Image (tube, rainbow, N blue to C red):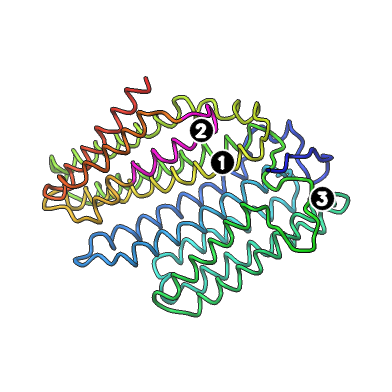
Amino acid sequence: MEQASVPVQTGGILRGEEDARQASFLELFFDLVLVFALIGVVSRLVPELLAEEVDWRSVVFTGILALPLLYLWATTAYITSRFDCRSRWIQLLVLVSAFGLLIMATALPRASHARGATFAVVYVLLHVGRPLLLRPLLRGYGEIQALYTRMAIWFSVSGVIWLAGAVMHGNARGVLWLIAITVDLVAGRRNWPIPGMRRPSINPWGMVSSRHLPERHEQLLLIALGETVVSSGLVYSHHPATLLATTALAISFLSAVLMWKIYYYRSGELLADAVAMSSDRAAAGRMAGAAHLLMVFGIIAAAAGSEVVLSRANGRSHPAWLAVILGGPALFLIGRIRLEQVVFNRIAIRRLVGIAALILLAPPPSFAPPLFAAVAAAVVLLGVALADA
């Protein structure tokens, strides 16, 4: 059984419910850094896909690198949801987190080599340092203080694995970092349990306001869709404006619009109301967050697929290209199904049909140009959007 959110006294460093209804300008500034980070993920992934010999291990490693970036955004979103961003200490914490995210993003191109230590050290310092900074500010809020003590302990444990991976090379680094981020995700999912310590009555995923975090997740999705448009536009601007390239750009833009439409109708539109009416708002918010992360991963893959199509509109498709061109929209629809379970407690058959269609479409495009696969993916998304309407 999930622990229910327990109301806590507000005031001082904590947000009141009225203060937590909308995202602050400080949070939106943090989101600008995330845009750069997502562009960095796609910029690292596309050259690996376009290489003469695609190294699947390198492709998977790029996916592993995206996880801590998005997890850093998620943990920061929960901090700004709980604490008052008008506090100078919280402003400092968020700005330091934004700078840390920026440093991690700049390390992406060489994270498998010289800059790997930078990536890991910054991630560990932020996730261990922020709870330690918050603890003395939470005198008088024993339950929340205990929560951040548990978080600091768990992130210290996973930090050892992160740093061990930083001193390793090759596949060993990727394996250790995959273990480390798995520890972080599972520990968070289990509310950071510590043997011998009483579980706080407050849920770490609890929300002061039912609208703030759903709004932040909507903004995260829009950031990912915006990255798709930016990446496609930049690639198109550096290529001759041929009919094929222009068609590929149009298909990329149409796919982004369709994913936006599928998201907002109607689960995205009603998410905040569904969380507000839930008997366990913390559990609903956590499930919605996981659904958004899945959708963002799908959008990132689709963005990489769009760049591949713009760069190699002609020629036979590589299996790795099809994995992102068709797999990205499929992963997005899987996340969208999860979101619909949170909002309506149901699974829409049309989205399952869309996923099945994307899987079945994979073999034929392997003998055709990647533009054919991009058109097929857009047609499937259009079918889902029309079925929604």
Assign a secondary structure to mark 2.
helix
Residue 39, image x and y in percent? Answer: 40, 53
Q: In the image, is residue 345 part of the stretch drawn in magenta?
A: yes
Label 1 environment density (alpha carbons within 10 Å; few <14, some 14–19, many ≥20): some
Specify which label sits upstream in the sequence, 3 or 1. Answer: 3
Q: Closer to the camera, 345 or 299?
A: 345
Task: State the mark number for residue 143.
Answer: 3
Residues tagged 3 and 1 counted as in contact (Cβ below 8 A):
no
Residue 333, image x and y in percent? Answer: 39, 38
User: What residue is at 43 percent from the left and 42 percent from the top?
Assistant: 295
Label 2 environment density (alpha carbons within 10 Å; few <14, some 14–19, many ≥20): some
Q: Is residue 305 left or right of residue 154?
A: left
Q: Mark 1 points at which residue?
A: 287
Task: State the mark number for residue 45.
Answer: none
Give above or below for 295 relative to 176: above
Specify which label sits upstream in the sequence, 2 or 1. Answer: 1
Q: Which amino acid does label 2 sit on?
A: Gln
Q: Mark 2 points at which residue?
A: 341
